[in-house]
Structure formats: C-alpha cells, structure tokens
Amino acid sequence: MANMNPNQIRVAGNGRILVAPVGTDAPADITTAWGPEWANVGYTSSDGVKFGRKEKVTNVDTWQSVGPARFIYEDRDMTVKFSMLQFNSDTLPLYFGGGNVVETAAGSGIYRYDVASDPVADERALGMEFTDGDDVIYRFVVPRGQVTDTEEVELNRKGSLKLGVTFTAMALDNTTPLASWIMKDGSFS
C-alpha cells in the first residue's frame, strides 16, 4: 500500500492531444517523437482532458448470501473528453464526423467543409501527452475509437468558440489493449 507522498501527486501542467488514422503506430516510449501521421489538434480549453470509465455489471445473487456471489461484465466504456479551440482541417472533421476541408478553387483561399447527411464511421487513433515539471511525462494512447458525443458550439462575443468532443475507445482486436499509459515517472520504480 502506498504511503502518503506529496511527490506522487500529479498536475497535468501542459499537454497536447493528437489524432491519427487507425493502425498508426504510437511511440512505444517517452523519448520517441510522435510520427508525422499524428496531427496535433492544437489549443484546447483550460478545462483540459476528462477521462471517463464505466462498466456495466450484472450481479449474480444467491439464496445463501445477501451480497452478490459474482459479477458478469456486460459493457465497458472508456472516454476522453476535451474541447478544441482551433478551427482547421484536422479539428472541424473530427468534431463533425469525418470528411475533408477542400479549397473551392485552386489559389482562392476559400475553403469548404460539407457535413455529411448520413453519418459514417470516423474511426481514429488518439494520443494524449502531458508533463508535470521537467522529469514527469505521461502518454495515453487509444489505438481505435471515434467521437461519440459533441457539445454545442456557442457563438457569442464573450469567448472563443469551442469544439467539445467525447472520444470513445473501441476494441481493435482481442489482444490489443483498449488503451495504454506510458509514463516517465519515478513514482512507479
């Protein structure tokens, strides 16, 4: 059991979120740079990133005990929620469910993004990285998932627009983890 140690308290002081096509290799360690396929979504709101984990279980009750004798796992959700502040060819399609931003005519500087009338799967890999000081680095990787919920985009003169999304992890196969943490943190030694 861990003793009380204030040096093991983590603050995600600075970080970034990246997306890539499913099947893109993520760095296997902390020192390796993210590959060119990984697009940094840029600035996110000061709310940072929120992780969610839900498991739905069914109790197996018995006549002999007032407590459950066993749990049957029915469902597992792992989510990453964040709000993007930048509008570009990576963030707009991530929010709206895929597709591409295209220039309307070569050299015009006018761009168009069409939101599809019928939803299609827009699966991606997601990477998140944060630092706490100079010596602590955490990376979190979801090999496969997709945006499953979005927040309303509020247009007003009081603040920046935010593209708020909830990214839900999906199984890649029966052997690949749903998600992985990679840490450079002396607290684990």
Image (cartoon, rainbow, N blue to C red):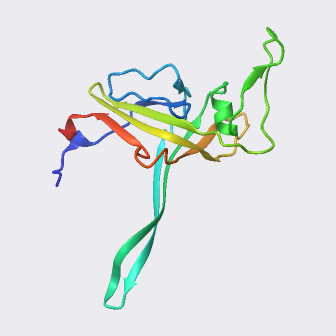
Q: Judge from the rendering whether residue 163 lies leftward or rightward of residue 75; answer left or right.
A: right
Horizontal and vertical percent position of residue 139: 38, 34
Horizontal and vertical percent position of residue 88: 66, 24
Judging depth in this view, the residue of 149 and 143 nearest the camera is 143
Q: In the rendered image of this protein, does residue 127 appear above or below residue 80?
A: above
Q: Judge from the rendering whether residue 15 lies leftward or rightward of residue 112; answer left or right.
A: left
Residue drawn at (30%, 35%) of the image? 183
Residue drawn at (79%, 32%) of the image? 114
**Which residue ends up furthest to the top in the rendered image?**
107
**Which residue ends up furthest to the bottom in the rendered image?**
63
Q: In the rendered image of this protein, does residue 76 appear above or below residue 168?
A: below
| On-image quarter of the N terminus | bottom left
| On-image quarter of the C terminus | top left
Horizontal and vertical percent position of residue 127: 46, 34
Q: Judge from the rendering whether residue 6 lies leftward or rightward of residue 159; answer left or right.
A: left
Residue drawn at (72%, 27%) of the image? 100
Residue drawn at (47%, 38%) of the image? 143
Q: In the rendered image of this protein, does residue 147 appear above or below residue 35?
A: below
Q: Quadrant of residue 99?
A: top right
Judging depth in this view, the residue of 166 and 144 nearest the camera is 144
Horizontal and vertical percent position of residue 59: 42, 76
**Can the viewer see residue 187 in this picture?**
yes
Q: In the rendered image of this protein, does residue 178 appear above or below residue 183?
A: below
Q: Judge from the rendering whether residue 84 lies leftward or rightward of residue 181; answer left or right.
A: right
User: Tag count in the figure?
Assistant: 0
